[in-house]
């Protein structure tokens, strides 16, 4: 969590950090939109580094044009990733039939329920210790 990280507030009342929103929304975009998000981010990073490096020490007009371009790019990025709330918008409705876990998490969850009489813990010595629901310890 970075205190300078931008965030979005949706009319639904939900708030999302930009990085978390991108992580959630970008996979649902079409290929052209994903490519455009990458392109915008690259151009924004380039303009930000130019402004920070001091290479724009010429006239204020040049700096203003970079600021204007950065604002236009940010507006376009906002339109792509924050057009609607990811929790209450059409993206959530469209993904209603998807599971909450991806394939590897689902397998791990299934395997944890195969033997419901014991749970595995790591001990300080690195040994695998199993605790049965009866409270008996097994090494």
Image: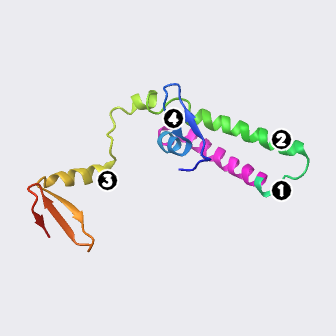
Helix, strand or loop at disc 2?
helix
Which stretch is magenta? Answer: 26-51
Answer left or right for 105 relative to 55.
left
Percent across and percent down for residue 80 are 58, 35
Please check the rendered image and state whether residue 10 is part of the magenta-colored stretch, yes or no: no
Is residue 95 at least partly visible in the picture? yes
Front one among 38 and 82: 82
Q: Residue furthest bottom?
A: 125
Query: Can residue 30 be seen at all in this image of the molecule?
Result: no
Quadrant of the rendering where the C terminus is positioned:
bottom left
Q: Residue at x 49, y 28 (%)?
A: 13
Neighbourhood count class around disc 4 (C-alpha, 10 Å): few under 14, some 14–19, many 20 upward:
few
Mark identifier at residue 64: 2
Q: Earlier in the sequence, mark 1 or mark 4?
A: 4
**Mark 3 — residue?**
104
State the SS at label 1.
Answer: loop
Q: Above or below — where is 123 with respect to 97? A: below
Q: Earlier in the sequence, mark 2 or mark 3?
A: 2
Residue 40 drawn in magenta: yes
- Residue with the mark numbered 1: 55
């Amino acid at each position: 969590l970075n205190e300078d990280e931008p965030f979005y507030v949706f009319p639904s009342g939900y708030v999302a950090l930009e990085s978390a929103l991108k992580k959630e929304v970008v996979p649902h975009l079409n290929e052209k939109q994903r490519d455009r998000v990458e392109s915008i981010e690259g151009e924004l990073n380039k303009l930000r580094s130019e402004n920070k490096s001091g290479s724009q020490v010429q006239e204020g007009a040049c700096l203003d044009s970079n600021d204007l371009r950065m604002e236009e790019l940010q507006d376009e990025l906002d339109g792509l990733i924050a057009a609607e709330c990811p929790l209450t918008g059409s993206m959530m409705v469209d993904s209603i039939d998807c599971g909450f876990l991806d394939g590897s998490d689902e397998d791990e969850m299934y395997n944890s329920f195969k033997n419901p009489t014991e749970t595995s813990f790591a001990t300080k010595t690195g040994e695998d210790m199993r605790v049965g629901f009866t409270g008996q310890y097994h090494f």
